Amino acid sequence: MILLPVIVFSHGNAWSMDGYGPLADRWAAAGFVVVQPTHLDWRRNGIGFEDPRYATIWRVRIADLHAILDHLDAILAQAGGLDARIDHDRIAAAGHSWGAQTAGHSWGAQTVGTLLGARVLGTDGEDFTHPAVRAGVLIAATGTGDSLTPFAAEHLPFMKPDYATMTTPALVIAGGNDQSALSTRGPDWFTDAYHLSPAPKSLLTIAGGEHTLGGLAGEKVAETTDEDPSRVALVADAVAAYLLDAFKLDGTAWTALAGEGGVQSKLS
């Protein structure tokens, strides 16, 4: 029996496991088992800045992913015995933003970053790394907190990732035109996860891409400001290619993509 690699995906703020079909479908077609939780910040729960739970949602999200990874077999057993078909040595975590709302929170990627070893400044260096995760993908990941706008500094004080300890291999994907309303910097803010973390890491910059990189969460998502199905396909296929290479299953597609330019890598 051929064992299948796994991607556990953390959605952006306000979305749910019902989103990101364009990514999940292409990853499944590439041979991955895709697990998508719905986090507490789903818009139907109506949790805003005034809600006392808001300040700890980032912790709840991390706990969600840990719970999934700790009980992955039991979860997948409910999907027709899929637990017997997964490769426990080839599990990846991926996340996009906190969501592509007007505020552009980047919780999904920040959540996954902590599982890869990143810390959150101001939390006494708490380590949220999960040993089951062998590789990661951060899509539109939050940059450092020293350039937050006054609004972000007031309402999102926990948006202060420290990538110096993020040692797990990872692909960082950033949009060339992604301008966050939470940062005083430009699109380069979303590349901090690559530049400030130790190797091995790779960076793919999507030319012209904004925060949803063409519409990652699906064609019905109103927040998409740069609708482009080909851009979405590029992101989805790049993630699959990177992980297949990282898991030493098939490096052909990743080698070809890297050879086309637009990919930076640091191996040591």
Image (cartoon, grey):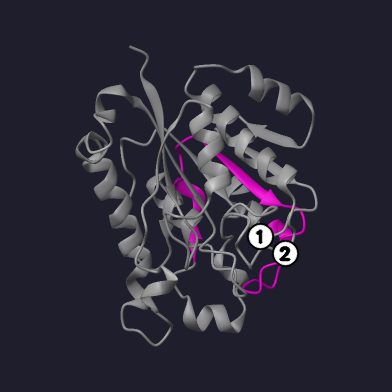
Q: Residue 128 carries which label?
A: none
The quarter of the rendered structure image containing the C terminus is top right
* Magenta residue check for 100: no
Q: Is mark 1 on a helix, strand or loop?
A: loop
Residue occupying the point 52% across, 24% down:
244
Residue occupying the point 63% across, 46% down:
173
Residue position marked by numbered label 1 in the rendering: 211
What is the quadrant of residue 231 in the picture?
top right
Q: First in sequence: mark 2 or mark 1?
A: 1
Q: Is residue 199 shown to the viewer in this render?
A: no
Q: Is residue 236 shown to the viewer in this render?
A: yes
**Mark 1 residue type:** His
Alpha carbons under labels 2 and 1: distance apart: 8 Å
Q: Which mark is residue 225?
A: 2
Q: Do the residues labelled 2 and 1 touch (CB within 8 Å)?
A: yes
Query: x, y percentage for residue 83?
Result: 26, 29
The quarter of the rendered structure image containing the N terminus is top left
Specify the segment rendered in magenta. Answer: 160-189
* Magenta residue check for 174: yes
Query: x, y percentage for residue 43?
Result: 44, 72
